[in-house]
Image (cartoon, coloured by chain):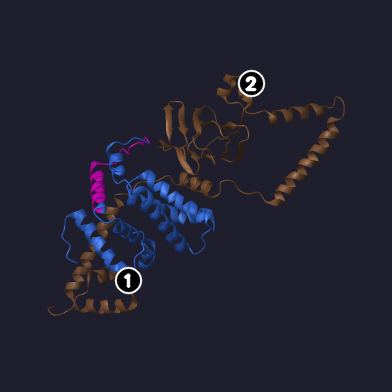
Chain colours: A blue, B brown
Amino acid sequence: MEFDATFDEIYPRLVRYCHRLTGDRDAAEDAAQEAMVRLFTHAVEGPVPALRAWAFKTATHLVRDRYRVDKNRRRLLQERPVAPARTEDPDRSLERREDEARARAALEALSPRDQEMLLMRFEGFSYKEIAGAVDVASTSVGTLLARAERRFHQALTGAEDEA
Amino acid sequence: MTGVDHLDEALLTALRDGVAAPADESRGRAHLDACVECRDRLAALEQRRTTVAAGLASLDTSFDLESARAAVRAGAFPFRKRTHRAAWARAAGAVLFLGVATAAAALPRSPVRHWLSQIVHSRTTAVPAPDSQAAGPAAAAETTGVRLDVPSGPLHVVLGDVTAGTEINVRWVPGSEAAILAPLGSRFTSATGRLEARPAPGPVRVELPRGVVPTTLEVGGRVYLARTLEGLTVSGPVVRRDDDGVVFRTPDR
């Protein structure tokens, strides 16, 4: 398993997934990096899709175990950021921040499992991989995913989907 | 299309995403050929996918991938194991060196003797930290370290196996020399743009050249500090911070 190639193939999407899941930059980096460290230290073998699925599943469990315990943490961080002191992107417009807040609220309206499934699907995972990662029957994934997507869309746009 | 069983949302979504099972794919496509209503629903799902993807993308932010790469590498491979062959080669070289040195140094007034004296002295003298120097020679002898000239970034400084509760004093320094200074018994390695240490228990001082970016400090596989052109990100457990640096304390286990 070549380190750089495997890292480049998996980590960027993994940390994005974790960040979407947690809304917390530090938590996302912690979970994604620890999952990657475990991937290498456990010497997991297989093709890249299998390694990616393993890393996502590991990170998902880390997020579940550690970063969702206190749901208020993220809100507190947003309201009263303490550390690290980051430079705010000056080009980040008010509209962009409103979009982000709306999407965050829509995502949090879903159950944790639905969030994970939706986010993994939009990272390109197959139904079978999603089933393995979130511990549901693969025959249920299609129905659960369609429902999760509909609910997210409704919460995001306020539209009543008829599909 | 009264009386027709329309495709359900899950199958339409699977058809949209190209992940339907072969049998469902055939049945679904055949139905779509005949059903305007389901084609309209499929088109709506296409639009929904675009909206959802955009919504999720609005949550995204940028990450420092190089710092993460270094952190993962340090966590997964904290110190590369040396091969037996390389160790034997080093041992043989050391024996040969000592043999020649002993023979040369045995000659009275030999310039080799003087030169060897200087070499041995410089290699065994601890690199004193400025704070230790202020505390006197006894304190200076307690500290050892490693220095590395880094004309330009990136610079990765990695501390592994750090004792819980260790104070890590990070200082910005002028010039281009980075350093780790730690209690005697610490182990150090260095490579181009990279300094690593397994510090013995006690305070650690890290000197980072102020002008070198990007610079990353990782402790125990976690990024404590990252400095890029965009600015400084401090994500470790800060004890105090000033214009000249940051002091961390590793968490108690």
Instruction: Look at the picture and state if B169 lies above or below A11.
Output: above
Foreground residue, B169 or B104?
Answer: B169
Image point (50%, 30%), residue name:
B169
Does A95 appear in magenta? yes
Q: Position of residue B119 (x, y in %)?
A: 73, 30
Q: Which quarter of the rendered picture does the N terminus of chain A lie within? A: bottom right
Mark 1 nearby-residue class (10 Å; few <14, some 14–19, many ≥20): few
Q: Is residue A98 visible?
A: yes
Amino acid type of the residue tagged 1 in the rendering: Thr
Disc 2/disc 1 C-alpha distance (Å): 73 Å
Horizontal side of residue A99 vs B220, given as left or right: left
List the residue tagged with mark 2: B137
Which chain is indicated by disc 1? A
- Which residue position is annotated with label 1? A139
Q: Mark 2 is on which residue type?
A: Pro
Measured from the top left, where is residue A62 in percent x and y? 40, 52
Magenta-highlighted residues: A84-106
Label 2, residues with CA under 10 Å away: few <14, some 14-19, many ≥20: few
